[in-house]
């Protein structure tokens, strides 16, 4: 026994230390950007490689290289070609996958949308494998390519525009922190002062919101002062088209308040001037809108036209970051969206805060549910549904009066559908248009993501 014990200890130490691939063995501290195109219609996707680019510094973790979160509609896996070892993976979502749920995709109009994957720059040839979730939610390999990082086919152009990165908040090395890069959209040169004020404002809003307030020191915040030729952004329903820096637009996927950007390569070429894990566009406009896609980017309008609605952008800003950073789903179901069967009722979504499964024994957030709380959890849904969407205060008062206010349960109505999908809490930043906090399940997801990127 005496001889076995030290061996066992040694073995367990090795197990702890060996949590993933060794960064220095496989990578150098730069970024490889793989640009590709999604083409297709609903139920049909073709992926084609566009180019491979070298970018400065790697902003992601050097310790956690293999993604254990299992979030996103897609993931990439990078294998060392010689040994077949998995050396990096990451989950994310795409504009294309979201577009596939719109009427346009169902009407069989083929579209092509550009996308990029950022990985640490490999030392030796790799195999790049791209996966998308099938209807049942399982990842299926869709595309793969062998890439030689030392080849002359790697584009080594410098970042576009030579913009000097400015630090709003710097708490440490980009490898140990989550780097948010704020980009100004629709701010002219003369309006850059306003952009800097907006940066200050939104960062105080974000880092006041739980759980971000408790983890502020895990983040760096950078911004680039990229001027637009004209002020504001496109608003197609009003016939307004603006020469703005990143070509963002309202009415994305024909949803008036949805602000997205499709000019992926231009955005990436400019963003490469700073290290980033998360891109956030602050849009110089007073018209309500925003958007957020997991591990792609977030957008939010800068200020509201009406004084009484001056807090609306604050709500949008943090809500969209909940999507893009925390992998959170919308918990609301009473507001207009342009999706068809976004969350099928017979499939468990990967998002942590929506589920069609209201079985108390297996519901995915059961660890947060107290034994006294019935699942599904009763609430005055019929009464709530009669109150018009715009009467937010009345809706809020009704929610507050419910027996299970403040308890985690399974409340019917979530993920854009009224029946068959459940949310964990009566109210949450992903449910109502208000300054209410994220619910405990959403906060837990955000904390999980923060820890994944910042802990060893
Ligand atoms: Zn929530």
Image (spheres, rainbow, N blue to C red):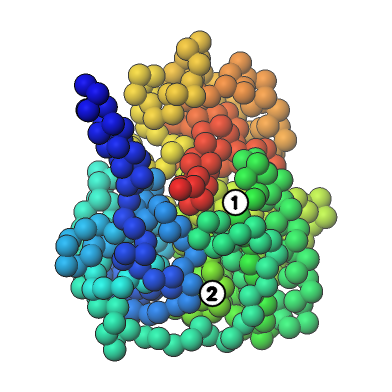
Residue 433 is at least partly visible in this image: no
Q: Quadrant of residue 273?
A: bottom right
* Residue at 52% from the left image edge and 36% from the top image edge: 444
Residue mark closest to the camera, 2 vs 1: 1
Give the class, few, some or many, for how many residues have Cα within 10 Å of label 1's Cα (few <14, many ≥20): many
Q: Nearer the viewer, residue 186 or 449?
A: 449
Q: Nearer the viewer, residue 164 or 142?
A: 164
Q: Quadrant of residue 91?
A: bottom left
Query: Dot 1 corresponds to which residue?
Result: 218
* Residue at 25% from the left image edge and 50% from the top image edge: 139
Rendered view: 319 above or below 172:
above
* Residue at 39% from the left image edge and 30% from the top image edge: 364
Q: Residue furthest right?
A: 307
Q: Nearer the viewer, residue 166 or 140?
A: 166
Does dot 1 land on a helix, a strand or a loop?
Answer: helix
Does dot 2 land on a helix, a strand or a loop?
Answer: helix
Rendered view: 442 above or below 247:
above
Residue 111 lies, in percent from the top left, at 33, 72
Residue 333 lies, in percent from the top left, at 51, 40
Residue 218 lies, in percent from the top left, at 60, 51
Q: Which mark is residue 271?
A: 2
Rendered view: 251 above or below 203:
below
Rendered view: 174 above or below 246:
above
The mark total stands at 2
Residue 4 lies, in percent from the top left, at 22, 28
* Residue at 32% from the left image edge and 47% from the top image edge: 18
Locate residue 92 relative to residue 256 in the image: left or right: left
Locate residue 75 relative to residue 442 in the image: left or right: left
Q: Classify the position of the N terminus by image quarter.
A: top left
């Amino acid at each position: 026994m005496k001889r076995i014990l030290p061996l066992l200890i040694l073995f367990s130490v090795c197990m702890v230390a060996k949590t993933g691939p060794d960064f220095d063995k496989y990578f150098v501290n730069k970024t490889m950007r793989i640009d590709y195109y999604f083409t297709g219609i609903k139920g049909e996707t073709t992926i084609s490689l566009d180019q491979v680019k070298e970018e400065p510094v790697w902003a992601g973790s050097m310790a956690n290289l293999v993604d254990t979160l299992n979030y996103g509609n897609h993931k990439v896996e990078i294998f060392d070609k010689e040994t077949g070892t998995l050396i990096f993976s990451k989950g994310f979502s795409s504009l294309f996958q979201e577009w596939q749920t719109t009427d346009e995709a169902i009407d069989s109009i083929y579209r092509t949308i550009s996308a990029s994957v950022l990985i640490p720059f490999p030392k030796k040839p790799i195999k790049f494998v791209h996966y998308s979730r099938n209807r049942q939610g399982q990842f299926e390999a869709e595309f793969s390519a062998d890439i030689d990082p030392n080849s002359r086919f790697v584009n080594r152009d410098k970042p576009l525009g030579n913009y000097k990165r400015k630090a709003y908040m710097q708490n440490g090395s980009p490898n140990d922190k989550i780097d948010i890069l704020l980009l100004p959209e629709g701010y002219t040169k003369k309006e850059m002062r306003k952009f800097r004020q907006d940066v200050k404002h939104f960062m105080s809003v974000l880092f006041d919101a739980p759980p971000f307030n408790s983890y502020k020191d895990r983040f760096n915040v950078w911004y680039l002062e990229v001027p637009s030729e004209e002020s504001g952004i496109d608003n197609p329903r009003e016939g307004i088209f603006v020469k703005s820096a990143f070509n963002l637009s309202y009415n994305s996927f024909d949803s008036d308040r949805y602000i997205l950007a499709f000019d992926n390569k231009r955005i990436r070429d400019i963003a490469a001037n700073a290290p980033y894990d998360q891109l956030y566009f602050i849009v110089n406009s007073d018209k309500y809108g925003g958007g957020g896609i997991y591990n792609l980017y977030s957008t939010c309008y800068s200020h509201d036209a009406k004084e009484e609605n001056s807090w609306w952008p604050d709500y949008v800003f943090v809500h969209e970051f909940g999507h893009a950073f925390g992998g959170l789903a919308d918990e609301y179901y009473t507001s207009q969206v342009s999706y068809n069967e976004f969350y099928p009722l017979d499939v468990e979504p990967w998002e942590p805060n929506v589920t069609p499964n209201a079985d108390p024994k297996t519901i995915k957030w059961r660890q947060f549910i107290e034994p006294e709380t019935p699942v599904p959890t009763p609430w005055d849904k019929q009464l709530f549904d009669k109150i018009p969407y715009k009467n937010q205060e009345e809706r809020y008062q009704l929610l507050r009066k419910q027996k299970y206010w403040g308890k985690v349960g399974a409340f019917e109505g979530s993920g854009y559908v009224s029946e068959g999908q459940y949310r964990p809490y009566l109210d949450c930043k992903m449910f109502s248009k208000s300054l209410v906090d994220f619910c405990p399940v959403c906060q837990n997801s955000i904390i999980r993501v923060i820890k994944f990127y910042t802990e060893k």
